[in-house]
Amino acid sequence: MTDATANSTGGTPGRNAGSLFDKDPRTRKRNAAETRFRMMGLAAVIFGVLCLVGLLGSIISNGVSAFSQTFIIVDVFLDPAKLDKDGDRDPDKIAKVTTFGYAPLIATAMEQAMEQANISIEGLGKKDAAELVSKEAPAQLRNYVLNNIDEIGETVRFKVLASGRIDGYYKGRVTMASAELDRNVSPAQLQLADQLKAAGLLSTGFNWQFFTAPDASDTRPEAAGLGVAILGSLYMMIIVLVLALPLGVAASVYLEEFAPQNWLTDAIEVNIANLAAVPSIVFGILGLAIFINMAGLPQSAPIVGGLVLTLMTLPTIIIATRAALKAVPPSIRDAALGVGASKMQSVFHHVLPLAAPGILTGTIIGLAQALGETAPLLLIGMVAFVREFPDGPPDGFFDPASALPVQVYNWTQRGDPAFVERASGAIIVLLIFLVCMNALAIVLRRRFERRW
Amino acid sequence: MNDMSRLERTVGTKNIKMECRDCQVYYGDTHAIKDVNVDIEDKTVTAFIGPSGCGKSTFLRCLNRMNDTISVARVEGQFKLDGEDIYDRRVDPVQLRAKVGMVFQKPNPFPKSIYDNVAYGPRIHGLARNKAELDDIVEQALRRGALWNEVKDRLDAPGTGLSGGQQQRLCIARAVATEPEVLLMDEPCSALDPIATAQVEELIDELRQSYSVVIVTHSMQQAARVSQKTAFFHLGNLVEFGETGQIFTNPVDPRTESYITGRIG
Ligand SMILES: Nc1ncnc2c1ncn2[C@@H]1O[C@H](COP(=O)(O)OP(=O)(O)O)[C@@H](O)[C@H]1O
Ligand SMILES: [Mg+2]
């Protein structure tokens, strides 16, 4: 536009009179405007990058410690007098011994470990020493014994979780000073932990359980893991992929290539665009009303979550697919029709393969959105505390499960500060999944495009 | 121009391949083709000339019902291929297009290999029973498209990687591979340089041995060089239709004369 006006005034005398080395005022003004615009753009980019770095930095600094965990090594004597009073190794009877029956074994083992390592700390009783070990440990021990009944009577070496406070001590969350004020841990216990560490009985290692263990109750953050949440999210993604991709592609192909252009298709088009903008919690209400109350599907189940997320993802996939189909040059359709291909052959042999990269990208972006979606899942009860792993698919689709973003939300609501670390760690896991999905989208797209 | 040689060329009476009577085409309210009557002869090159926007492409697309794909387009009149009405309700346009092939203005090879481009038509029409037969069809088509020698060593290379002229000859080979009876070409040389144009023109002359060819062109020289019959369109009307030599040397209508001498268009 500037050029056009420049040309129209080009006839004015003197405009072309000056030397090429001197910039005329018009050019200077134009260059200044361009520089300003570039600066503004650059500033916007820098601002965005800074925000992102700040966000990632805070999440990582909070959450990276969730990936390491403090363990205590104890040699537990599986006392037959406690576990199997009759001595007949009957699994049913042994199963009657609750975790309370196992706790003393660990306490004794701790005592012996201290004796052997010559550790004695003033004012630290046997019970206090046992508190270094997570409350989850007796349950782990019990599971082990029930699976290995013939080892009763032997001494077995276990690597048990240290309690949340001890773990926090080695992550800098708990200090001697804060322990003074803490009902759950005393400075003496921290000293004991230090000495156990010196004796090689306490160590910090990678926290595999964070990925494999189910959620744990408020009092044992050290045992809380993402296992059920990851599995639940995976199930929901499978359901979304299996339902939304074929439905979305079929709908788009029909609307874009086959449907007559009339008010009805226009109305559908407008509605799909609107649907993409509907707040996700509305889909949650819909899911609650239709899938749970009307269809009677179980609460907290991945099948319901998957269906709700499918509804949410469909518009995204349809819009992306239609854009991808529109981007295929019409000359390709003409070419196919020109050699006598039917409409469907031209679509399936030529148009869809060319649109595939776009469809794929749209689908993965839709899936990524669905993976991070929280609000609708809260409404259909996926926020419940679930410790049982769901079965394998397809039965597991109907079992209660959690989901990654809901687990994050859940953990941020808990009292113990150790859950802050867990929540940030879960966010990191979620982000890693998202990055992997986007990387996959890029790789697939490259692969498709590299064909030509 | 060698108009004189055209004049002297004997044009015997031939079979009418396609017969078009009282043809009208509307795009919505626009009346794009008005009362056009044209007979396309077998084994003849018929050229449609005229200023741009006069409806040449529109009329050409009527001949294989490509206008069906444009929702606002409405076609009226009689179009007969070998005496059968191609707009009859019983006619499947897909079957028609296998008989009346088309080459477009812009080269539009599929983004597949050269081989697959040519083999696509025969494949979907089931013209080959096995791979060897298909190979044979592809080779024949590429030879007829005057492209075989240039691409025989790289049949797996993408068709889109060829030069513009090669791409257009590939498209011609692709159209030829389905054994059409009529070949429609919409300004096939408009995107090509003079050398590629000469190659394509030579090709058209050879194709005339087996097909009836209809070519739209805005270049009068090209029409004079390749065609035996010429139709001159102007503003949707067929102004003049006859032997190419006669149209170029002795036009009946003053509008034809002004166009040929460069006064309109
Ligand atoms: N798809 C279309 N929709 C509406 N009008 C069209 C369409 N295609 C062509 N027309 C109109 O029909 C007339 C003839 O066009 P066309 O056949 O392409 O001319 P030519 O090929 O001779 O240059 C033009 O006025 C053009 O605007
Ligand atoms: Mg045209």
Image: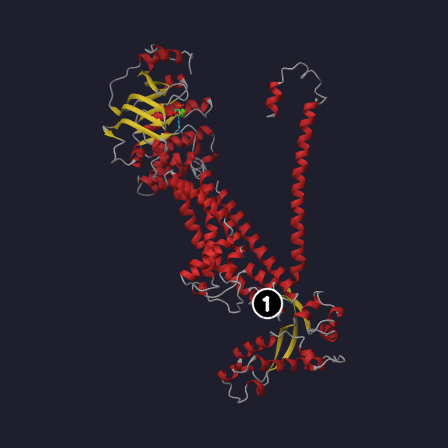
Q: Residue furthest left?
A: B83
Asked if one can make out residue A443 in the rendered structure from this viewpoint, the answer is yes
A10 with respect to A304 (left or right): right
- Name the residue located 42 percent from the left edge and 37 percent from the top edge: B110
Asked if one can make out residue B187 in the rendered structure from this viewpoint, the answer is no
Q: Is residue B257 above or below residue A100?
A: above
Residue position for label 1: A224
Nearer-the-camera pick, A274 or A120: A274
A117 with respect to B82 (left or right): right
User: What crowding class fits label 1: few (fewer than 14 Cα within 10 Å), some (14-19), or many (20 or more)?
Assistant: many
- Name the residue located 51 percent from the left edge and 54 percent from the top edge: A281
Which chain letter matches label 1? A
Q: Residue furthest bottom?
A: A86
Q: Quadrant of residue A410?
A: bottom right
Q: Position of residue A321 (x, y in %)?
A: 46, 44
A100 with respect to B155 (left or right): right
Q: Is residue B3 above or below residue A192?
A: above
Nearer-the-camera pick, A408 or A19: A408
Q: Quadrant of residue A162?
A: bottom right
Q: Position of residue B30 (x, y in %)?
A: 37, 25
Q: Quadrant of the N terminus of chain A?
A: top right
Q: Position of residue A269 (x, y in %)?
A: 43, 42
- The amino acid pointed to by label 1 is Ala
Q: Is residue A366 above or below residue A389?
A: above
Q: How many marks?
A: 1
Q: Position of residue B32 (x, y in %)?
A: 36, 24
- Quadrant in which ligand 1 is drawn: top left
Nearer-the-camera pick, A81 or A321: A321
B75 with respect to A137 (left or right): left
What SS does tag 1 mark?
Answer: loop
